[in-house]
Image (tube, coloured by chain):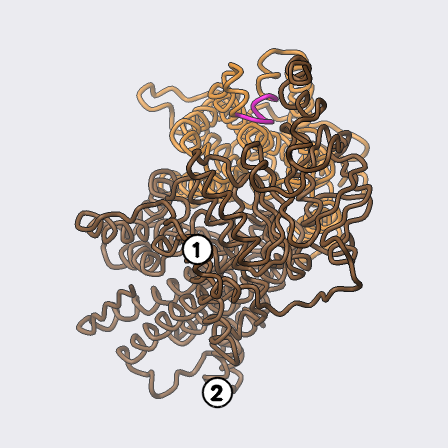
Chain colours: A brown, B orange
């Protein structure tokens, strides 16, 4: 993946330019952690680069040893970036861009004009090892390689996956156990640390640093964004190539000297409109197209699996550390009492009381807009609720959504709540976020038990995919799969998180009659083999009739009927709700 | 102090013109645009060039008022082109892509300005003549007075537009759900075009008026317009035109008062930033915003 070009044959000035490009590439890779992974646009990254550089110069120039200057640059820039990221906890993406723009401007007008910050008279002493051009260049390349490695490691940790959830499905990330706030801040910290390293590289290269602050102005911040977009957010090799193109070429090719930035800006616009995945997207497509020409694409449908045959493996998925023990002997796993949900003037749920007993498959039916999904939202914590919802006897309503997923609740969403841009395996791993408890930094460094925890998560993910016949699709991008398969992946992901209670929202939507039949079998097997309790929202009445032990029918937020499926579906009020009054009268007759 | 406030209000009125454009684009397309300030500046600089050096091909030097007209027309044209080529293809994409695209547009325009007009600050006598008005102890130059009048007129016109005209209703429909609006027969593409052309024209007016008042516009002076107008729009609530006006006025006043009381350079920028942060932390949807901005 990493493309390392070593033109050691180049001469001194060219090598010096390349060192500068390496620093810019590092800054762009740091920005990409925010843009590509966390979905936050920062227009202040050139200022952060300046912070790193000036910190290194200040520490080194005042007598500190060079390694200390580098470390100081990394730490200080990480800290500044974290503080700059604090507003993102409260405000959304577009406004964050405005705030970072203001920060960049402030840094230029306020911070970088102070002589004690820019330290014009001080210089950072290069260590003897890096005096010559070639060793310095190799050092800068090593730094780039280190950053690429860190980014790779991030992708294999729970925090890296959590960032994707924050980027794409932020409002629902809590359902996976992802805490959006600390996760976002981590992205800012890591981004800052990487940019700080870039600043240290710049400071090591430059002889008279403090006099020129042009590399840290708004134009450079915007060019960094251009590099990330043209290179392709998330693609390390793409960004490096884009850095070479946007930063090196104008300095080396005379014709581009004046118009270089303008060409880059035009490239940015062209890129975002026509080729949003940038150079990285092109690089990814080439091997994929070559491969496809030769092999058959795997069938995008799940294999039919006999769940009974895999019961031991299935039981394995149920073994998870559970915090909430049963508080007292309760007959009902889930108990809702007088639950109400109001959105402004609309009463979505009105005085709803129902219970779900352990080992049941409960059906929730009703016309569109009856409040079924709203009830799921109430249980998982995404709706403003009055009343009481008890799970295993403990009251849920005071607990944030993130906590509730640790109690053994898992759900699927009506419009598919997974990250379509990522692979099936990544999504199933994402759903298990609450299971691994290590902090982001430890994950990147591979400290402590993090590697073994990751292995365990992957093992469970493999099991879950096998149970649903999806293991041959593990490396496929979720968004490329047919709708029905995507929904099955979502169920597999929910099961992988080891719940006791599974809430399935219209799992049969988009499935044909055969697949609906198979889905019904799966529901029964989930209950029989994995011991799960299910609540299913469904419109497909035969499925409900075959599978459910008990049924509740909602209309306009109120419960209008409950009982066994046969009882409920023959009641006049239920038929009227679905088919209209005339039909119900016919049925009665 | 009163004098500062009056002066600040007049600056705020000019920022409001740009901020209204930003909110208009946001309401129609859900995309936040950083490009308006630079679009206006480009129009103004073209007008200046044609006034000084004559219109290419005609050799006719524009009268002073002509710079205002050219600024408006050129900026509106740029808005039209941007909408058709850059923003229309991005309609289905997440808002972040739209933001990045407008960033690119602003960057292209700013760098083109550097190439075409050079780096020096460009100025001209105000397009609306050289008179002054004394209000409550403050002396306002002609441009500032006209800015206030134009801002008020635009606000009134928009009120009538949204509440009384059919096209205004179409804009509101597109705002709440473009897909449904399209299905119902609302000319959604025309609405997008209107948003960008109108916001471009407004930005051109703002640049032509405020440029002379501030002593000129340098290429790539994003801080002047873009940041203040964005701050005003964000504080007011991105989906409220009244909010944009109110927010911009507040920004103008704060900037003027802080700038006069505190000697340190850049202090007014710090004040603007602080105001944005405080408002967003206390009320993330802005002062007048209806929904939490995306």
Q: Main secondary structure of the magenta part?
A: helix
**Residue A415: x, y in percent?**
54, 39
Residue A220 circle label: 1
The answer to whether residue A242 is left or right of residue B25 is left
- Sequence-wise first label, 2 or 1: 2
The front one of A166 and B232 is A166
The front one of B294 and B242 is B294
Q: Which residues are magenta?
A: B172-178
The answer to whether residue A49 is left or right of residue A134 is right
| Quarter of the rendering occupied by the C terminus of chain A | top right
Q: Which chain does the numbered disc 1 sit on?
A: A
Residue B174 in magenta stretch: yes
Q: Is residue A278 visible?
A: yes
| Quarter of the rendering occupied by the N terminus of chain A | bottom left
Instruction: Note whether B200 is above or below A212 in the view shown.
Output: above
**Residue A493: x, y in percent?**
50, 54
Give the residue drawn at x 57%, y 68%.
A319
Residue A65 circle label: 2
Specify the quadrant of the image occupied by residue A240: bottom left
How many numbered marks have been drawn onto this rendered protein structure?
2
């Amino acid at each position: 993946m990493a493309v390392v070009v070593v033109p050691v044959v180049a001469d001194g000035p060219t090598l010096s330019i390349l060192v500068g490009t390496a620093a810019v590439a590092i800054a762009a890779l740091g920005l990409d952690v925010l843009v590509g992974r966390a979905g936050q646009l920062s227009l202040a990254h050139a200022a952060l680069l300046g912070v790193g550089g000036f910190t290194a110069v200040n520490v080194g120039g005042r007598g500190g040893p060079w390694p200390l200057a580098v470390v100081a640059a990394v730490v200080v820039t990480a800290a500044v970036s974290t503080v700059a990221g604090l507003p993102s906890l409260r405000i959304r993406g577009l406004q964050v861009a405005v705030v970072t723009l203001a920060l960049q401007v402030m840094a230029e007008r306020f911070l970088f004009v102070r002589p004690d910050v820019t330290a014009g008279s001080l210089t950072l002493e290069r260590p003897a090892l890096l005096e010559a051009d070639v060793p310095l260049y190799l050092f800068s390349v090593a730094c780039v390689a280190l950053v690429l490695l860190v980014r790779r490691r991030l992708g294999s940790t729970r925090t890296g996956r959590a960032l994707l959830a924050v980027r794409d499905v932020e409002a629902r990330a809590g359902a996976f156990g992802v805490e959006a706030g600390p996760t976002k801040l981590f992205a800012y910290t890591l981004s800052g640390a990487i940019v700080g390293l870039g600043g240290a590289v710049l400071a090591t290269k430059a002889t008279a640093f403090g006099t020129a602050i042009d590399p840290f102005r708004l134009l450079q911040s915007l060019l960094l964004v251009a590099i990330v977009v043209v290179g392709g957010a998330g693609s390390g090799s793409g960004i490096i190539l884009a850095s070479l193109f946007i930063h090196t070429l104008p300095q080396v090719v005379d014709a581009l000297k004046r118009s270089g930035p303008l060409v880059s800006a035009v490239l940015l616009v062209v890129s975002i409109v026509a080729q949003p995945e940038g150079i990285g997207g092109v690089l990814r497509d080439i091997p994929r197209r070559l491969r496809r020409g030769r092999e058959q694409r795997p069938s995008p449908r799940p294999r039919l699996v006999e769940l009974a045959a895999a019961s031991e493996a299935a039981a394995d998925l149920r073994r998870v550390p559970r915090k909430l023990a049963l508080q007292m002997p309760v007959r009902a796993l889930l108990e809702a009492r007088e639950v109400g949900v109001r959105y402004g003037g609309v009463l979505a749920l009105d005085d709803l009381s129902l219970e779900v007993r352990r080992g049941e498959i409960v059906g929730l039916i009703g016309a569109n807009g009856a409040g079924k999904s709203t009830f799921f939202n109430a249980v998982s914590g995404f709706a403003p609720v009055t009343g009481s919802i008890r799970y295993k006897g403990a009251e849920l309503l005071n607990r944030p959504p993130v906590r509730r997923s640790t109690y053994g609740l898992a759900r699927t969403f009506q419009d598919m709540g997974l990250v379509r841009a990522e692979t099936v395996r990544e999504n199933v791993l994402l759903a298990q976020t609450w299971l691994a408890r290590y902090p982001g930094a430890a994950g990147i460094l591979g400290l402590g038990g993090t590697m073994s925890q990751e292995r365990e998560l992957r093992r469970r993910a493999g099991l879950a995919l096998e149970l649903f016949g999806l293991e041959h699709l593990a490396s496929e991008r979720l968004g490329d799969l047919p709708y029905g398969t995507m929904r099955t992946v979502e169920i597999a992901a929910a099961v992988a998180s080891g719940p006791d209670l599974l809430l399935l929202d219209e799992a049969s939507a988009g499935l044909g009659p055969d697949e609906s039949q198979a889905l019904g079998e799966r529901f029964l097997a989930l209950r029989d083999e994995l011991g799960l309790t299910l609540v299913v929202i469904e419109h497909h009445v035969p499925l409900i009739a075959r599978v459910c032990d008990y049924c509740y029918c909602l209309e306009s937020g109120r419960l209008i009927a409950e009982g066994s499926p046969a009882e409920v579906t023959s009641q006049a009020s239920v038929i009227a709700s679905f088919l209209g009054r005339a039909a119900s009268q016919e049925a009665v007759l | 102090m009163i004098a500062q406030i009056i002066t600040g209000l007049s600056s705020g009125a000019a920022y409001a013109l740009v901020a209204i454009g930003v909110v208009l684009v946001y309401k129609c397309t859900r995309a936040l645009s950083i490009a308006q300030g630079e679009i206006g500046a480009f129009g103004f600089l073209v007008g200046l060039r044609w006034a000084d050096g004559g219109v290419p091909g005609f050799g006719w030097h524009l009268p002073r008022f002509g710079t205002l007209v050219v600024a408006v027309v050129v900026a509106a044209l740029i808005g039209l082109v941007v909408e058709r080529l850059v923003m229309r293809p991005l309609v289905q994409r997440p808002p972040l892509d739209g933001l990045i695209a407008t960033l690119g547009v602003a960057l292209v325009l700013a760098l083109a300005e550097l190439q075409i007009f050079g780096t020096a600050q460009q100025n001209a006598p105000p397009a609306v003549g050289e008179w002054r008005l004394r209000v409550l102890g403050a002396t306002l130059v002609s441009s500032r007075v006209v800015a206030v009048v134009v801002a008020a007129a635009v606000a009134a016109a928009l009120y009538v537009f949204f509440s009384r005209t059919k096209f205004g209703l179409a804009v509101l429909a597109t705002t709440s759900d473009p897909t449904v609006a399209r299905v119902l027969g609302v000319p959604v593409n025309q609405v997008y075009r209107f948003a960008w052309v109108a916001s471009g024209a407004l930005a051109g007016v703002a640049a032509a008026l405020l440029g002379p008042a501030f002593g000129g516009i340098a290429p790539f002076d994003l801080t002047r317009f873009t940041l203040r107008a964005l701050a005003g729009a964000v504080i007011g609530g991105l989906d409220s035109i009244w909010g944009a006006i109110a927010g911009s006025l507040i920004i103008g006043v704060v900037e003027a008062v802080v700038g006069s009381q505190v000697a340190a350079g850049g202090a007014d920028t710090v004040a603007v930033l602080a105001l944005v942060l405080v408002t967003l932390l206390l009320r993330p949807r802005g002062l007048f915003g209806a929904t939490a901005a995306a």
